[in-house]
Amino acid sequence: MKAAILTDTTKCIGCSECVLACKKVNDLKSDVPRRWDTDDGLSARNWTSVMGEPDNKFVRKQCRHCLEPACVSACPVGAMHKTELGPVVYDSSKCIGCRYCMMACPFGVPRYEWASLVPYVRKCVLCYDTRLKQGRQPACTEVCPTKATIFGDRDELLAEAHRRLRASPGKYHNRVWGESEVGGTSVLYISDIDLSFLTYGEHFGDKPLTQTTRLAMEAVPFTFLGVGMAMTGLYWIIQRRMALQAEQAGGKSDGKTEPEE
Amino acid sequence: MERVARLKLILWMFVGLAAAVATARFLFGLGATTHLSDGTPWGLWVGFDVMGGVALAAGGFVVTATVYIFKLEKYHPIVRPAVLTAFLGYVAVVVGLLFDLGLPWNIWHMMIYWNPHSPLFEVGWCVMLYLTVLTMEFFPVAAEDFSALARARRFLVRFRIPLVIVGIALSTLHQSSLGSLFLIMPYRLFPLWYSPILPVLFFVSAVGLGLLMVILESHFTAYLYRRKPETHLMNPLGVAARWVLILYLVLRFGDLAVRGQLHGLLGGQWQVKLFWFEIVLMLAIPLILLFTPQFRERTSWQWVTAAIGTSGIVLNRIDVGGLADLSRGSRLYFPQWTEIVVSLGIVAAATLVFLVMIEHFKVWEERPADPDANPRKLPGFDKVGLTWLGTPVIAGRVKYSLAFVIAAGAGFLFLGNPRAASQGVEPTPVHRARGDVMYLKTGLVNHQKLPVKSADGEEGVLYLDADLTGYGVTFYHQREVDRNGGQKSCVLCHHMNMPRDRNSGCYECHRDMYLPTDSFRHDWHASPAGANLACVECHARGYARTSAHVKPCVDCHKHLIPSGATIKIKTYMAPSYVDAMHQLCIGCHARVALKENKPEVARCVECHKGKLNYADAQNLLYRRRALTGRLVVLPPAKANEAK
């Protein structure tokens, strides 16, 4: 099973029960507005938030748990990890605090404990340790009173999302957010409003972001060897030519004119 | 030599400032000393200290390649300074990284936890390895003066060519990989900077920067130590830099054209203006100067070219590293002064080490004298004139230490209160609260403040909107009672009140919505700059140092007790309440006694613990009135009517 969440924004009434349940389960303390907050309501102590949009629309924001997560590929020490079950989890004991995951995330989800002297990255982990491992669903989906956000297998939820789109044509934007962009995400949305504000880019491609660095990273050993060999070759050629020139000029040379300094 | 001494003085000041900020950085965290945010988690310390630093140190591999691989022997004199610059540059990068990392003590994790998919992992390893290579390249110079190290030195000199080749390969890798770092954020970086060929652009500009940096460093040190500037040697380097910059120009704009972003060059956003500023600094001005022989061959113009070009390319790194960030909804990032000071301080420290190395090791053929090795003699005492001759001179270590200490002191002064800043909470003053009683179970709101209990007996909760935003906080009376020390604490709020208030406003104690506040300033009392009290002067010896074992404020603040008063003054009472007591409080006390079924609250002895006869009380009252002049004495006739 690939754990996933489907959020239907037309059903959301903005009650923020999911936010409270998340705080309870993950033992997150109460929060106050900080200088480094962004306007989406997420913070190191708010792993999910309900964004109020015009016309009484509510959109729940949380980690998307990408199928090919940019944060996992970016982390230099492998502190971010995509589990078999589906959630992207974080190992604070490995973290060095470089915040490259925060830069890499196309949804701008990971948060930092800027106020702390021992700051860690914080984000939704889909209740991986606290509930998912024991076969229970995340706290947020369990408490949702209108079943606007539901938990299940990703394939089944995708089918359910498409079923809803077919069942009431015209009610929704005809797409499932998270189905394919940046390689697909585990957290899916169907909505009657445009959800591109959840991301940095308005026009996300379907190519996973991990692909963007792959070419450069695969070229690393070849670049190293190539540059090394080219330099060795150049050195040898130039050395040889200088030796020959010296011979022609009549001077004595042993071919090794390596100066002491 | 005065030039060197003067420069050193300025550098020491920068180091002092940076030391103060560094202290705050490690005592109070990143929140206190940076303008970084969840929207822009990378800023100047990544853009300048790390990315700019690595690029500035590119001169090392460029010059070693020129001399040892391409055999351009005439550049031999600049190999040593270039390698030294590179070595110190990389050390500075690592130091800068320690500031920027949230958990700098974990920096070694990169050696044991591997993630080969990450460009940052590769950069980290390359920097580690290249720093080792640079150490081995520079070691022979440092070891020259120590005969004990001769064997190691000979060994490293023999392996110089392989070392140089490995160094070039490593530099190629991480100079370009610093660009690869940003490939993963196509949606975050502004389109004028994001490009699939960022690694190539970074590498090419690093080579250009390396060449310009060599020119700058050569002329700078020549100026400092009054040597003959190596203008003719630098001229071909300028020519080389010219072609590198041309290549960069073609690549940069060709890439924009291929990606169809050329129309973006005419946009009105501030990022576009930043782009053009960067292009003018790093390409336009240097190229014009380098293509004009009369500029290129003149020492002063080489200076200008190198200075403008290097700052342009470093600006490019800063832009990519944080300035040209497109994060949605977050405030624009601009570095805090503390970030700038730390960056400058690291550069200053590296420069100081560079100068010391030049003076004490054989980096050049002849070592320049240390300007402070023989400080000017202190002026002597003239016995005939009975006076000091000349002005006293502070020189050498004393002078630099003084500069350092003064700058560090100024830094601490500028820092203000980093603890408050570290919480990132903006000051939100609390006003006189407006609120209603709310019943949480039913959600009903009672606009009348009393009764606090609903019909079915549920305790109402005060819902207070203290910052006047339209959003309130819930106020649980019992919780406040528990927190402030049980029943005895009633006075904390109910005796601070102004006439006709039933209780004190929240803002009397909570001056800010989000900062923990206390009406009693403990910090001030303990601080040497404040009351400067030892703990035992208030807290009883041998007991836990809590509010339970502390002597009342009136023990020291005698003025809180009106002269001749016999009632027991509570710790928190202000003197004017003695007046208020008899006129306003008794009624409230009587009400509370009835409502809470606590008759003792209404008894006189609750307040008047000692004996008090009526005449004394009357005297007291009148004396206070005469002293304060605040209360108007009612004429006897009217008083009788009121009765």
Image: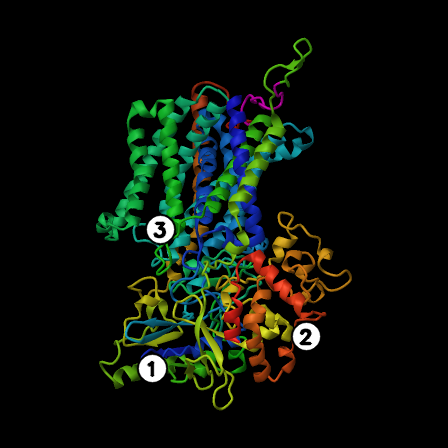
Same chain under badges 2 and 1? The reply is no
Q: Are marks 3 and 1 in contact (CB under 8 Å)?
A: no
**Which is nearer the eye, B538 or B227?**
B538
Please give the range of residues in magenta: B362-376
Q: Residue at x 54, y 40 (%)?
A: B410
Q: Disc 1 residue type? A: Lys
Horizontal and vertical percent for residue B142? Answer: 60, 31
Q: Secondary structure at mark 2?
A: helix
Q: Disc 2 residue type? A: Val
Q: Residue at x 63, y 31 (%)?
A: B143
Q: What whole-number distance in Å separates the C-alpha atoms at marks 2 and 1?
A: 64 Å
Which quadrant of the structure image shows residue B543?
bottom right
Using the image, tell me which numbered label, if any, was put on residue B324: 3
Query: For the image shown, how many numbered marks are present on the structure?
Result: 3
Which quadrant of the structure image shows residue A214?
bottom left
Against B13, residue A212 (above or below) is below
Label 1 packing within 10 angstroms: few (<14), some (14-19), many (20+): some
Horizontal and vertical percent for residue B549? Answer: 72, 65
Q: What whole-number distance in Å separates the C-alpha atoms at marks 2 and 3?
A: 72 Å
Residue A128 seen in render:
no
> Which residue is under mark 2?
B605
Q: Nearer the viewer, mark 2 or mark 1?
A: 2
Q: Disc 3 residue type? A: Ala
> Which residue is under mark 1?
A11
Whichever of labels 2 and 3 marks the residue nearer the N terminus, that label is 3
Horizontal and vertical percent for residue B157? Answer: 58, 33
Q: Secondary structure at mark 1?
A: loop
Residue B370, magenta (yes or no) = yes
Residue B609, magenta (yes or no) = no
Label 3 packing within 10 angstroms: few (<14), some (14-19), many (20+): many
